[in-house]
Every structure is written in structure tokens, then in C-alpha cells.
Image (cartoon, grey):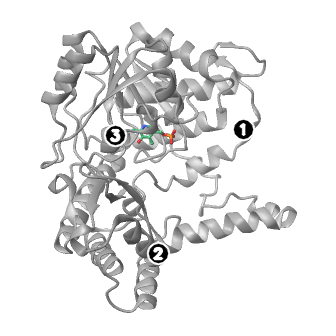
Amino acid sequence: MPVTPPAAPADVPPADAAMPQDFDALLHQDPEVAGILLAESRRQSSTLQLIAAENFTSPAVLAALGSPLANKYAEGYPGARYHGGCEQADAAERVAVRRATTLFGAEHANVQPHSGSSAVLAAYAALLRPGDTVLAMGLAYGGHLTHGAPGNFSGRWFEFAGYGVDPDSGLIDYAQVRALARARRPKAIVCGSISYPRHPDYGTFREIADEVGAYLIADTAHPMGLIAGGAAPSPVPYADVVCATTHKVLRGPRGGMILCGSELAERIDRAVFPFTQGGAQMHTVAAKAVAFGEAAAPAFAVYAHHVVAHARVLAAGLEAEGFEVATDGTDTHLVVVDPAPLGVDGRTARDRLMAAGMVLDTCALPYGDARGLRLGTAALTTQGMDEADVARVAVLFGAAVRERGDAGRLRSEVRELAERNPPYPG
Ligand SMILES: *Cc1c(COP(=O)(O)O)cnc(C)c1O
């Protein structure tokens, strides 16, 4: 049953821009910090945000984040708090949990993790003991820091085995996943990545996990918004635990969430609080509720499908510009390209793109140790770009990397394209 957010009462003025209503007061009291916030707002609206993990959250979400619920301590869970005065905090969390379980068809949701990494930490804490073996995508292929990086808790406390992708197709090699699972007998298998542009085959991951008696953890930090909008398959029927962020394609506040079946609900809840976190950030929990309400509306499904269509336009445009496109395209919001055919390495390409006003990351490529470029279309789509705009982004991207044409003109064309599609109109 889709959740329809109630219409705002008629006497509430519409929030019209990124800045909260009391921004003028901040400007007066603390011009130093206010100036930084204004400059950041201008940076976001005058450059193109191609970082695949970023998006523009709505004024309604920003309003919840800037609300007095930020003042409230609420350790524990609704109806069982360690602090008094939690009536509204409980109400906000109950709405967030109800909307999350409805939106994703899950039996249980925990909406308290402070971030995607906190969600993964809690999932490991619920299911594993230090020293256990975990099979996840190798860091060199797009595994996240929490999938066994030596500088992260995961790499220190668990034994990680890493699967990769086929070097020619760039696709996950399921025969290798199965062989590694049989050889290493992991306690958990993690599927999910920071740069894999295709859908994981959750059914095959489930089969492999069952064969070796492992838990299946889906880390869908990136595609959770596509899943919400029906533009990507859901891991919920297959995975024991689903970890995600709420701020990537899902377009909510910065934060994490965990979904699971009722049999693991208590273990997951205890692993979040008190095992890995203290008091939840209740203003963020309320903002998550707002974002889930937005994601349940039909307009969000349209958005999610546009994000994917735009990523395909971007991939095709970059291929035409001479870039090597990983997996020959995309099924998601992510496009990964290698600029090597243009005679430019990834870091140089990123620097040229940044100078032209296109903000993005480098990422690992599934072969050798060259760096590729990772782009996403979630933010461009939120600010209202259409396929023609995105095709133009690909041309500007190619021009910047090749240093083709006048640099000043290129920067102003990028600025115009961004400013024609303001993320916060008004
Ligand atoms: C982004 C991401 C995370 C972590 O999210 P943070 O909020 O930055 O901690 C974890 N796993 C994957 C696969 C991600 O893409």
C-alpha cells in the first residue's frame, strides 16, 4: 500500500529555497559560518554534481533536519526509551519505520543508523563474531571501505575474501563467487558495491549463501532509491539483512537504514543500540520519514526511471566521445568510464573536469591499477535536466577531458546549464 503524504495545511507557506527561514538570523549572528553556507549553496547550483553518491534533498527534508527535534535525546526505541519527553520522537520514528517497511516490503526496519557505514557495522555486529570470514566484492573492483578495507573496522576485525568481475565484460563472475564461497566457507556474503553499474543477481547470491550456510547481506547504499521507485530489483526477498543509505538516489537526509525479517529484528535493533550507537538523531529520523513519504509517491517512480534513462544517455554519449564505458553501459544511475583511450589518466581527467565545473570522483577499474571516472545522474535528474541536457553534459565532459575549445567558454557553458536547472528554484 503506497504511503501518500498528507497535503500541507493551507496556512503553511511553501519553503522556497535551500536556506532555512532563519538563515537571515544566522547571517546576522555569525557571518563567518553563514558565508560558508551561502558559498556552498552557490557552488552546488553553479557546477554540475556528477558524484554518484550525491543528490539534492527536498526543502521538506531540509526543514525536518533544521527542526527542534534536533534537540531531543532518545536512546532506545519507541515505547522503550531511556529518556523522558519522547512522545514526538516516538511518533516520528514510528512513522519512519512504518513508511520504510511499506515502501520496501520488509518485515522490519531500523531507521537509526547514523550512516551507511554504521548500518553495515551493525549488520556485522548482529550476525558475526570478530575473526569470522566474510565474502564481499574486492576493494579493487568496487567494494566499499566496510567490505574489508585495512583501514576500516571491517578489515581489522574480520577475515575478508574478495570476489571480482570478469576483466572483459566487467560483470560479476558468479562462478568465482561460488568457488570462493566453497573454499572459504564465509559466515556472511555481502553483495553491493560503490561502482558496479549493473544489478547484482540477488537470487544467485542467495543460492550460493544457502549452499555454504552463510548469511546474505545486501549493501544497497547506492541503488536504494531506484529500488524504492521500482527501477531496480529489490534484494528484500533474498537477503537476510539489507543495509542502505538514505541520502544517495533515495534523496533523503544523510543517514543509514537496515531492513530484515522479523526473526532477526531484535538482534539488528540491539546491534544498532546499544551495541554500536547511542542516542538516535531524531531530526534525521523525522527527515527519513519525510523522504520515505516522498519516495512512495508516483512522482518518485517517474524520477527513478528517469535517473536510469539519463545514465544510459550519459553512457552512450561518453562512448561516442571516445571513453571506454565499463560493462558497455548501465542499468542504474552509475556510469564508470576509463579515459585511457583519450590518452589521459583518471586523475588528470578529474582535475580537468573539476576546472570546467563538473564535480566527480575517480574510482577503481576492474583491470590493472588505472583509475577510472565514476559518475551518476541522481542529482542532475533531481534538478530537472532532460535527456537533451544530459547528452550535452556528455559532450562538455568530452571537451573538458580532451581540453578541446576555449576553457573559459566551457566553464561558462557548464555554469549556464547548471543555472538553467536550479536544484532549489525560487
Ligand atoms: C555509500 C556506501 C556506504 C557508506 O555510506 P556512508 O553513509 O558514507 O557511511 C556503504 N556501502 C556502500 C556500498 C556504499 O556505496
Q: Classify 10 Å Cα crowding around label 1: few (below 14), some (14-19), many (20 and above).
A: some
Judged left or right of residue 412, residue 62 is right
* Residue corresponding to mark 2: 357
Labels 1 and 3: the sequence-earlier one? 1
* Residue corresponding to mark 1: 70
Labels 2 and 3: the sequence-earlier one? 3
Please state which amino acid type lies under the numbered disc 3: Ser
Residue 80, picture quadrant: top right
Query: Residue at 39% across / 18% down in the picture?
Result: 260
Outermost residue on the front side: it is 368
Please state which amino acid type lies under the numbered disc 2: Gly
Pinpoint residue 61: horizontal percent, then vertical percent: 56, 47
User: Tag 3's secondary structure?
Assistant: loop
Please state which amino acid type lies under the numbered disc 1: Ala
Pinpoint residue 418: horizontal percent, then vertical percent: 44, 74
- Which quarter of the image is occupied by the C terminus? bottom right
* Residue corresponding to mark 3: 193
Closest to the observer: 46 or 405?
Answer: 405
Discs 1/2, front: 2
Find out if the beta carbon at label 3 lies less than 8 Å from the nearest ligand 1 atom.
Answer: yes
In the rendered image, is residue 205 in sight? yes
Residue 402, picture quadrant: bottom left
User: Tag 1's secondary structure?
Assistant: helix
